[in-house]
Amino acid sequence: MTARLLLQLAAVFGGLGVAIGAFGAHALHDSLVKAGRLDTFETAVRYQFFHVLALLAVGALWAARPELRGLGTTGWLWLGGIVVFSGSLYGICFTGITKLGAVAPLGGLLFLAGWVSLILAVREL
């Protein structure tokens, strides 16, 4: 992982968040409401965007301070959290397979581990 790759991945996941969010808000809104999944969908998009913004900040910090190599671990953990947490919630919304909800806590743990990783990566600032 490099600062450039981290920023590029943040841009990709940010763009995907916009596309998925718009698709849900427009094309899927009625079916999400009917299925009682609008809140689940909104949670997935929200957590994706929170962590995309965090990835952008970490990428910018890493670009300015390349010696903070632990920021790469932070990035991987948050990216994994987006894929697992938000991805499992999207999966529930799009497929109706509620068993995917069992995976979401693993994504939450990845998010939390990323925040701990950030604490450790910047302890020498």
Image (cartoon, rainbow, N blue to C red):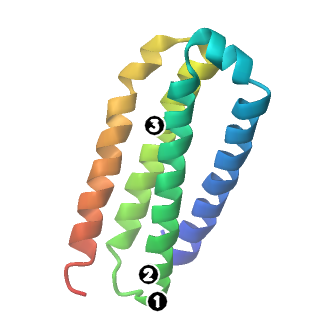
Name the residue carrying label 1: 64
- What residue is shown at x 49% (from left), y 84% (from top)? 63
> Which sits earlier in the primary sequence, circle 1 or circle 3?
1
Secondary structure category for the residue under label 3:
helix
Q: CA distance from mark 1 to mark 2?
A: 5 Å
Compared with residue 116, is residue 95 higher up or lower down, i.e. above or below?
Answer: above
Q: What's under tag 3, amino acid-wise?
A: Val
Secondary structure category for the residue under label 2:
helix
Q: CA distance from mark 1 to mark 3?
A: 29 Å
The reply, left or right, for residue 41 in relation to residue 34 is left
The reply, left or right, for residue 74 in relation to residue 38 is left
> Residue 94: percent from the left, percent from the top?
64, 20
Name the residue carrying label 3: 84
Tags 1 and 2 in contact by the CB under 8 Å rule? yes
User: Marks 3 and 2: which is nearer the front?
Assistant: 2
- What residue is shown at x 43% (from left), y 81% (from top)? 61
Compared with residue 77, is residue 71 higher up or lower down, i.e. above or below?
Answer: below
Compared with residue 81, is residue 26 higher up or lower down, i.e. above or below?
Answer: above
Compared with residue 4, is residue 40 higher up or lower down, i.e. above or below?
Answer: above
- What residue is shown at x 39% (from left), y 30% (from top)? 104
Name the residue carrying label 2: 61
Mark 1 is surrounded, within 10 Å at the Cα level, by few (under 14), some (14 to 19) or many (20 or more) other residues, namely: few
